[in-house]
Amino acid sequence: MGRLFWKFFFFFWLAQLTAGLGVGLTFWLRADGPPPFAGEPPRPGSRDAGPPSAPSFSAPRAWPSAPDGRPPPGPHRPPLPYVPLVAGLLVSLLFAALLAWYCAKPIRSLRGAFAAAARGRLGQRLAPAMGGRRDELADLGRDFDRMAGQLKLVMDGQRRLLHDVSHELRSPLARLQAAIGLARQQPERGEELLARIELESARMDGLVSELLTLSRLEAGMEGRLDETVDLCELLATLVEDARFEAQARDCVVEYPVPPSPSCLLTGSAELLHRALENVVRNALKHAPPGGRVGIALLPEIAPGQCGVRICDNGPGVPADDLAAIFRPFFRGEGGTHADGHGLGLAIARRIVELHGGSIVAANRDAGGLCVSIALPRGRAGATLPGG
């Protein structure tokens, strides 16, 4: 038993003991003496006393003598009830121990769970140990379970991210080392190998840049989100850039004239442009040569919300992977092996969430993938930490 148990135990026990002794002593102090001797008139105030009579001026009456000739004993009190006091003491001891155990048991469980969490064991849960309790300590145990679950998700994500980053960096580093070795052995291929080294360096630089962007977004270090952004104008600029990029793949970017002249949002124009650009470039990468990418502005998808839908006619994504494609470094089994590091959609999701919106993916019936983005209109600007 810990110190808290003994504190509860002694406080509860002393409180019960003090109350019991106080009540017992009160009754003992108020107890009457024995009844008067035979022939003695009842004492004033007793139940046998009659109505008060006139004062008598006769000689004082002598007290009757005891049979052995000694004067009668004066009024005395009954002996202390030792048996009830001892029984009450034992019962109060038992109940104080039970009450202290009931209060201290969940705290011991919490202490053990925190010790396990400090050692990195975040799978321990307190809900089974709390049983059917419905009090503040049980609420504290459930709060601990939620905290441990979130910490486990974060730590697992960090481990997975570290593993994925190491894997992504290993390949270009290996190619760099191979190119350097070949350049030393075959100096006549210097220009070709320098071009390869430059390409791999650019890939590594792009990966580090995307990782830095994702890290800043996760840490909330992207400044203020209080700009007025016209989503219609933003899409028009984005579509122009996408059509230029699509020429290399002989793809067509379709963007019908939106029914509404403008769709005003509150946020960061730069971040929203990057999020939409990442989704559009992802669609272009997975669209087959000569394919089509459709971009549509949805001015009113819900009260107070507008959105964007970006679709391609590529191979699509397995249904089980539709939510996973927004995780960093996700590699699907059913899709094409396009260039990239798997960070574009993860960055887009984080940017959309920072603006109070949502992003989902779904397969088209005719083949391909559709990514739908919903954003609130005119949301009050927010200041992120570090901005």
Image (cartoon, rainbow, N blue to C red):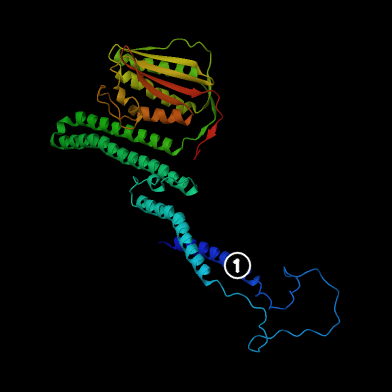
- Left or right position of 286 against 78: left
In which quadrant of the rendered view does residue 205 lie?
top left
Residue 114: percent from left, percent from top: 39, 52
- Using the image, determine if residue 181 lies above or below residue 325: below
Q: Nearer the viewer, residue 171 or 53?
A: 53
Residue 115: percent from left, percent from top: 37, 54
- Left or right position of 223 against 32: left
- Using the image, determine if residue 266 lies above or below residue 259: below
Give, as a three-letter code, the residue at label 1. Gly
Q: Residue at x 80, y 84 (%)?
A: 60
- Using the image, determine if residue 213 lies above or below residue 144: above
Q: Quadrant of the N terminus?
A: bottom left
Q: Nearer the viewer, residue 105 or 225?
A: 105
Disc 1 is placed on an element classified as helix
Question: Which residue position is annotated with label 1?
Answer: 22
In which quadrant of the rendered view does residue 366 lie?
top left
Residue 146: percent from left, percent from top: 42, 42
Q: Nearer the viewer, residue 192 or 214?
A: 214
- Using the image, determine if residue 71 lies above or below residue 88: below
**What is the count of numbered marks?**
1
Q: Residues within 10 Å of mark 1 (few under 14, many from 20)?
A: few
Residue 235: percent from left, percent from top: 45, 18
Residue positioned most to the left: 185
In which quadrant of the rendered view does residue 296 lie?
top left
